[in-house]
Image (tube, grey):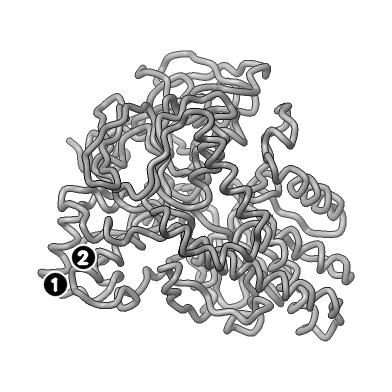
Amino acid sequence: MADHKVVIVGAGPAGMRAAETLVRAGLRPMVVDEQPASGGQIYRRPPSGFKRAAKALYGTEAAKAEALHRCFDALADRIDYRPDTTVWGLKDDRLFLQNGGAVEEVRFGRLILATGATDRLLPVPGWTLPGVYTLGAAQIALKAQGVAIGAPVVFLGSGPLLFLVASQYVRAGVKVAAVLDTSRFIDQARALPWLLARPAFLARGIGLQNALRRAGVPIHDGVRPEEILGGAEGVVGLRWRDRRGRSRETAASAIGLGWHLRSEIQLAELAGCEMAFDPLMRQWRPVADPLGRSSRGNVYLAGDGARICGADDAEIAGRLAASAVLEDMGLTPDRSSMRALLRRHARMKRFAEGIWRAFPWPADVCAAAADETILCRCEEVTTGDFRRTIAETDAPELNRAKAICRVGMGRCQGRYCSLAAAEIMASKNNFQIAKAGRLRPQAPIKPLPSAVRSSTAPDQPLRSQRTPSPELG
Amino acid sequence: MSKPRFVRVAETGRAPVRFRLDGSEISGLEGDSVLTAVLTNAGHVRISEFSAGARAGFCLMGACQDCWMWTDEGDRLRACTTPVKAGLALRTTPPETGTWPTTRS
C-alpha cells in the first residue's frame, strides 16, 4: 500500500486550485479524478481531436477555464495525478481506488475532498422515457461531444443551469421549444439583496434570459410539470401547468430536467464527517469551518461537494482547504492572500444564498407527486409504493424505508431520488424534512467492474476474481 | 434499430469508427463516447430490468449508471464514460438469457 501525505479527490476547479496551492508550498499531492482529463464537469475538456475554441465551449467563462487548465497542466510532473480513477471506498485513513480492472489501496495523511455535485432531480411522470436527461447531461453532450440530446428540446426545472444550457443550445443552432422555470419572477426579485453581492454575475444571468427571448424562445416562470409524454420510441412532448394553472402541451423530442445541484457527499460520509441539514439548500452537507476543515481532523472539504457555491467559489475554496492543510502540517500558508480569499469566499457564499432563494426547490411538486409516478428510476419503485411502505411499516426514516421498498437501493444509490423521497416522507408524516434523515452510503459508492468486484470490501484484502454478476450488490 | 436520438451539431470532421450494435454494423466518430456513438444511430442503449422500458442514459457523468450496456462477449460497460472503439460489438440486451437476473420473463 502506498503512503501519501496529501490526497485530493476530484480535479475540478476546487481540486485543481488545491493541488496548485500545495505544490507551491513544496508538497507533492496525489490527485485522483474519475475523468480522463482535469476540469471537472464545469470546465470539462472534449477528447483530443475536437477543434472548437475555448470561447465556443465555455462562453463567458473561457478565460477562467483556460487559466485553470494551463495551471493544472503545468503541475503535471509535481503531482501524482491519477485520471480515469474512481474512489469507490474509504475507511479510516485508506482510500480504495479503481482504474479499469485494477484496484489500489492508498493511505492518506490528509485528504481534501473536492467531489463536486450532480443535478438535483425530482420525479416527473414519464421521466424514465428515453430522451429525458438532466440539464448537466444536456450541457455535457454539447460541450464534450458536440451533440444535442435531441431536437426540438424543452428545458424544465430551476437554477442557473436552466438558462445557461438553453442559451448554449440556441447558440449551437438547436431548436429550443420552451424554457420552463418552476420558480417565479418574484422569487428572483426577493433574492436581489443577496444576488447583488456579485452584480456582474447577476447581469450575465439576466443577459442569458434576454438573449433567449430575442431568439424567440418561449420562457415561462412559475410552472409546474404535469407529465412527460411519449412511449416506446421515447419523448414526444411535455404537459405542464402555466403560472395561471392552465394545462398546456409542448412538443419535444428531448427534455432537459434539473433543479440546481446536490453535493456528492458519499466520501465525506464514509470518512465519518459530521453532517448538517441545510434548510436553504434543503439537503445535507458536511460541516466545515470557513477554511474547509471537516469535523474529522485530517479530512478537508472544498467546492460544490461541500456546499453548492459554484465554480468561482470552488477555486477559492480549493485554495483555502489547501491552506488549512498547510497550516495544520505546521507549514506557513500565505496569510495575507488567505484573508483576501476569505473575504471573496464570504461574498460568493452570500451570492449562492441568493441563488437558492431565487430558484427554490419546488418541494410541493414532490409532496404532490401522483402515486403512479416512478420515484426510484433505477428499480422503478413508484411514489405510491414508497408511501404505502411508510404507512404500513412506520418506517421512521429513509434507510428503513429503503430496506423495505428499495427506494435508493439501485444503481445510482439514491443520487437521483433520495432528496425527493425525503420530501415525500416528510409531507406524508407531517414532520420536518431533516427528520427523514439521509441515505447511508455504502462502498462501493460507484459500481465496480465484475473483474474486481469480488472480495473488495474495505475490510478484506483486495483480490481479482471474475464473477458473472451484476455490478451492484 | 429505433430512430437516432442525439443530433450532431459540431465537431463532425472526425474520422469514422465502425462498430456493431445488436449485430448491425454502424459507425460513430473518433472521440465519441459509446453513448454518443450509439444514440446518434439508435434511440436507446438498454432495456430496464424491471419493465420493458427502453433507457438511453440520463446524467452523462457516470453518476446515474443508467447507460450500462453489454458486449457480445458478455462484458458490461458504462456507455457515457467509455470511448467508442473500432470493432466493439455492443448489445442493448443481455447476450444469453439466464446469465443476468431480470424480473421480466
Residue at position x 25%, y 43% from top?
Answer: A241
Q: Position of residue A86 (x, y in %)?
A: 59, 55
Please, what secondary structure does the residue beneath circle 2 have? helix
Return the mark for residue B92. none
- In the rendered structure, the answer to whether residue A452 lies left or right of residue A57 reads left
* Residue indicated by mark 1: A393
Image quadrant occupied by the N terminus of chain A: bottom right
Chain letter for mark 2: A
The residue under label 1 is which amino acid type? Thr
For the residue carrying disc 2, how many other residues have a C-alpha within 10 Å: few (<14), some (14-19), or many (20+)?
some
Which picture quadrant has residue B103? top left
Mark whose residue sits in front, 1 or 2: 1
Quarter of the image with the C terminus of chain A in it? bottom left
What secondary structure is found at the residue carrying circle 1?
helix
Q: Would residue B43 be found to the left or right of residue A51 on screen?
A: left
Q: Identify the residue position indicated by label 2 in the image.
A: A404
Q: Which residue is drawn at 81% across and 68% down?
A: A22
1 or 2: tag closer to the N-terminus: 1
Residue A279 visible in this rendered orientation of the protein: yes
Residue at (47%, 59%) from the top-left corner?
A: A189
Q: Could you tell me if residue B73 is visible in this image?
A: no
